[in-house]
Amino acid sequence: MIAALLGTDPLFNPGVHWVELLIVVIKVLAAFGVLLGSVMLMIWFERKVISDMQSRIGPNRAGPYGLLQTLADGIKLFFKEDLVPERADRFVFKLAPYLALIPALLVFTVVPVGGDLTIAGHTFELQVADPPFGILFVLAMSSISVYGVMLAGWSSGSKYPLLGSVRASAQMISYEAALGLNVVAVVLTARSLSTRTIIGSQAHAFWDWNVIRLGFVPFFLFLIAITAELNRPPFDLVEADSELVGGFNTEYSSIRFALFYLAEFMNTITMSAIIVTLFFGGPDGPIPRFIPTSDIWMPIVWFLAKTLVFLFGYVWLRAALPRLRYDQLMDLGWKVLIPLSLAWLLVVAAVIVWGWWGLLVGVAEVGLGFGLARSFGVGAARTEAGGTF
Amino acid sequence: MDLKFLGGFKLTFEHLARPRVTRQYPDEKRPKQPRQHGRHVLNRYEDGMEKCIGCELCAGVCPADCIYVRGLDNPPDHPVSPGERYGYVYEINYLRCIHCDLCVEACPTEAITESKLFEFSFTNRSDAIYTRDELLVGDDGLPQKMPWEDWRIGDDQHTSGWMRATSPSGAAAFEGEVQWSGELGYGVRAPEGGQSGHRDDEATGSKQLRDTMEAHLLPEDIPYAHRGMRGRVWRAKLSATKKRDKHEAGKARRAEAKAAR
């Protein structure tokens, strides 16, 4: 049962004994520690890079180069007064931060960080778990984190968090559709839901990476959708710190507030890792034939480097783009991302089935699109002229 | 689709390499403006005589009512000031002073002027009231440093009668004419540039400020000589000079410390 859940890890070939379980526990603890440490560094990195982009200096007092700033903030938040509003639903109010945090932690379990590692005769994958439904698990967890936001706003017993959480959950649910559709394109080419199989299907050279093989569009759509899903700028209407009272977490203080913050940055890191896994070949170097991958460390370095590029990208987005208006956000999600994802998915499926002839489906779609746009235009013109259909 | 928003990516990326505007204040101070209004000094003539004649005009004009002056006849055998009287009590309460410089305007003998020193954090009321002995410049003509004041080398420069709230050189009729009497430690100084004259950034201490700000101006606001490749060379030279100065200052300090040992 456990072996089936944890997937095709060679660790379980001899069967599940206490040694194997111990290795699993160690892997879990290591992943947890690495993730928390990288969140700490990520918050520092974001603050440093954004201040560089704004010609400021950024945190530089706590520790060398301000590296311990996050720790200092965390300690400060920990000792702040923990307020629960009088009209709050106390149980749900206390539960919500964990509903946001735990999915963020769990998503990282299916991310392949490196190749196989052999220690004292036990070979295992550098990945906490490799279930055959890996990528579905990611989608499930990102859906559950919506509950964290929704319940946090609802249980606060206050109108601002409630309105904030309604907006937030609407946004996250809308963009989940586009997210899933682009994942489907990847799954179609890899013919598997397992994350390790997905990176295995891209592991020849950089032109086999899904970003190129699927024709860039699914990658960009996925990137936009996931930025909205993460509530990162320019889609950070959930918090909109310069406009709103604070969104769903208005009533939160002390360590509970810190947990939301932690979850947000943890999600940013894990989702960058997911992008790398789905579209950039995970831990594979650009040309593995010339750069040996048998080494244990090189894949990890590649993985970290690629993830770092996306983390920098998120910070860059935050520095460069103004926040979208709510209707613009919804328009982008429903009228651009979802139709485009669907259309591209059809083309990908057709190419897989019919080879290059499948591109004809794309041509047909373009024609159909023009037809639709034309009919909308005519309809709008007639309505404006006061006519009826 | 309007793709102008991509310019935001370019701009923010360029800013990664630009100099920072933030200064690490207590460690590193921004150069002060040439006419900064700080705390007052009571100046002396070149022969060491006090300029104050105890006329109380400064106290009369003070809108915050923070100056208290009492004049007294000069002792005939060793006079304190060249006039008939001198200020034997002179107190300024810095809990009230608003640094408007009206006292400096009112003073007929350039006795009271404002220095650029503003960083004093006294911890009791009696320290806040500067007495005559504290306000008077020292035997070298420079302001006296109180234990609660924080100022570095150079902060006490250009602080005396040369510094007026409104420069007489600002009027066209007085351009290029010396408008102040000679004083201890400085002698008679050359007149300021005035409105049309050459602005000496080095002398007034605002050059560094302008260099820093220039990197953040819009491209069309940057002087032609500092644009493009030429500007890059200029900035590189600037930072190299700064680094060299810092290095040499460090070397001198170490040598000094070694000599002291």
Image: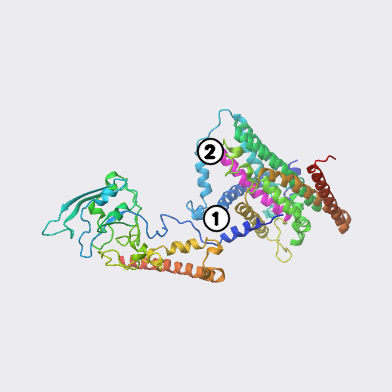
Mark 1 falls on what kind of element? loop
Q: Name the residue under label 1.
A: A54
Q: Does the magenta stretch include residue A277?
A: yes
Q: Does the magenta stretch include residue A92?
A: no
CB atoms at circles 1 and 2 under 8 Å apart? Answer: no
Q: Give coordinates of residue A261: x percent, y percent.
A: 59, 43
The mark closer to the camera, 1 or 2, is: 1
Q: What residue type is labelled 1?
A: Gln
In the picture provided, is A132 more to the left or to the right than B253?
A: right
Which subunit holds the residue at mark 2?
A
In the picture provided, is A75 more to the left or to the right than A175?
A: left
The residue sitting at the front extreme is B173
Q: Name the residue under label 2.
A: A254
State the separation of the CA atoms marked 1 and 2: 29 Å
In the picture provided, is B98 more to the left or to the right than A47?
A: left
Magenta range is A254-279
Q: Which of marks 1 and 2 is nearer the N terminus?
A: 1
